[in-house]
Image: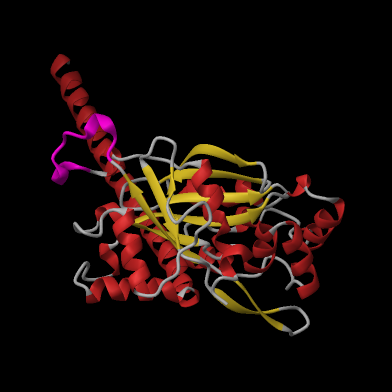
């Protein structure tokens, strides 16, 4: 009797172990499937972004021609950024759901009082993927007239559109990120918004189009792996840099350096069929220095976790201005 019970217990243990193994493999395959969807979403964003921002290909091609990289995949994407409106059914609270689904984790929040913006960044599930930076306009902080203009468009969104998406379907997500969330604005409304908030005007027309992607310069070969050197290279190929806050924006600890191109001008068609050149998207560059406690590590052992993480509000405040008239008008 004891032998029979023992045999049954062993069999039960074996079955339980097999169950755990099958669950582990099932989880692994499910995770791989989710990551494949994320890969497709990011590719869709980058494909359209490159079509709109010619500086992307210009910089990549110059890097290849100068034998600094062999292809686009050699470039580490530090982060990508999106802009949105802080209103019901939209804003960070809605948009973040897409990336939280893929294993991103919400990190620090930022407040930009003068620009009336909120922001938050998101850490990726692993170092293969870029960080995400999402900002939103604090609509309620504006005059009643500006609020009414914005809400005349955003009130067309009557429920959170992300809740209706199948977040395991990359085509659905890609379509959402590039579709009209509200009617096409009038040129008059665009100009009125621009007078009070250039950020608001940008979002009312461009919506969720990728605002920028970021080349990590510290991962490039020697001679190009500092922001000072990389800015010199970018200038040498005829790409203009934003001088808002200086050509290089530096964090208070001196460990995060950022610069950016001036926004690409795009021909935009407004509701009455009239066409105007407006600010589109741009390219950012970032240098994340090694944290002091890891400064003695051999350079070949340095990974992302050994470098300065997160963002800096004072840097980001000036990076926003890459799409502002003070910069864009320099290209005209």
Of residues 193 and 210, the one nearer the viewer is 193
Q: Quadrant of residue 40?
A: bottom left
> Which image quadrant is residue 259 in?
bottom left
**Which residue lies at the image location 65% right of the left edge and 64% below the top edge?**
202
Is residue 191 rendered to the left or right of residue 214?
right
Q: Is residue 97 above or below residue 212?
A: above
Which one is nearer the viewer's eye here, 127 or 230? 230
Q: Quadrant of the C terminus?
A: bottom right
Q: Position of residue 288 (x, y in %)?
A: 33, 45
Q: How is the image coloured?
A: secondary structure
Q: Is residue 28 above or below residue 330?
A: above
Identify the residue at image location x=74%, y=49%: 139
Q: Is residue 303 magenta?
A: no
User: Which part of the image, by quadrant, shows the N terminus?
Assistant: top left
Query: In this rendering, is residue 279 above or below 24?
Result: below
Residue 15 lies left or right of residue 280; in this view the side is left
Is residue 295 highlighted in magenta?
Answer: yes
* Res. 211 in view: yes
The picture places residue 275, in percent across and down from the top left corner, at 69, 83
Is 138 left or right of 132, judged from the image as shown?
right
Residue 169 can be seen, yes or no: no
Q: What is the magenta range?
A: 290-302
Query: Which residue sits at x=33%, y=54%?
Result: 227
């Amino acid at each position: 009797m004891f032998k029979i019970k023992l045999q049954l217990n062993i069999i039960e243990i074996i079955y339980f172990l097999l169950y755990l193994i099958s669950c582990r493999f099932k989880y692994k395959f499910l995770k791989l499937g989710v990551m494949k969807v994320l890969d497709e979403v990011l590719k869709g964003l980058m494909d359209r972004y490159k079509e709109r921002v010619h500086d992307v290909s210009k910089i990549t091609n110059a890097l290849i021609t100068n034998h600094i990289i062999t292809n686009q995949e050699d470039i580490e994407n530090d982060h990508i950024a999106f802009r949105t409106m802080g209103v019901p059914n939209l804003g960070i609270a809605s948009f973040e759901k897409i990336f939280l689904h893929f294993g991103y984790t919400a990190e620090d929040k930022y407040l930009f009082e003068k620009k009336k913006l909120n922001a938050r960044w998101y850490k990726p599930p692993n170092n293969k993927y870029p960080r995400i930076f999402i900002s939103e306009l604090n609509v309620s902080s504006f005059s009643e007239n500006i609020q009414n203009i914005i809400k005349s468009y955003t009130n067309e969104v009557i429920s959170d559109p992300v809740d209706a998406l199948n977040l395991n379907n990359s085509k659905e997500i890609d379509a959402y990120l590039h579709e009209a969330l509200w009617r096409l604005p009038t040129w008059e409304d665009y100009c009125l918004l621009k007078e009070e908030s250039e950020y608001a005007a940008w979002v009312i027309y461009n919506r969720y189009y990728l605002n920028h992607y970021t080349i990590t310069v510290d991962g490039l070969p020697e001679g190009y792996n500092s922001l000072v050197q990389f800015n010199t290279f970018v200038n040498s190929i005829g790409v203009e840099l934003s001088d808002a806050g200086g050509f290089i924006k530096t964090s208070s600890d001196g460990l995060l350096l950022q610069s950016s191109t001036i926004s690409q001008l795009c021909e935009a068609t407004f509701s009455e069929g009239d066409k105007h050149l407006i600010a589109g998207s741009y390219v950012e560059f970032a240098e994340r220095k090694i944290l002091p406690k890891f400064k003695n590590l051999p350079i070949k052992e340095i990974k992302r976790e050994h470098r300065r993480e997160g963002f800096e509000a004072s840097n980001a405040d000036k990076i926003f201005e890459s799409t502002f008239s003070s910069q864009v008008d320099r290209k005209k």
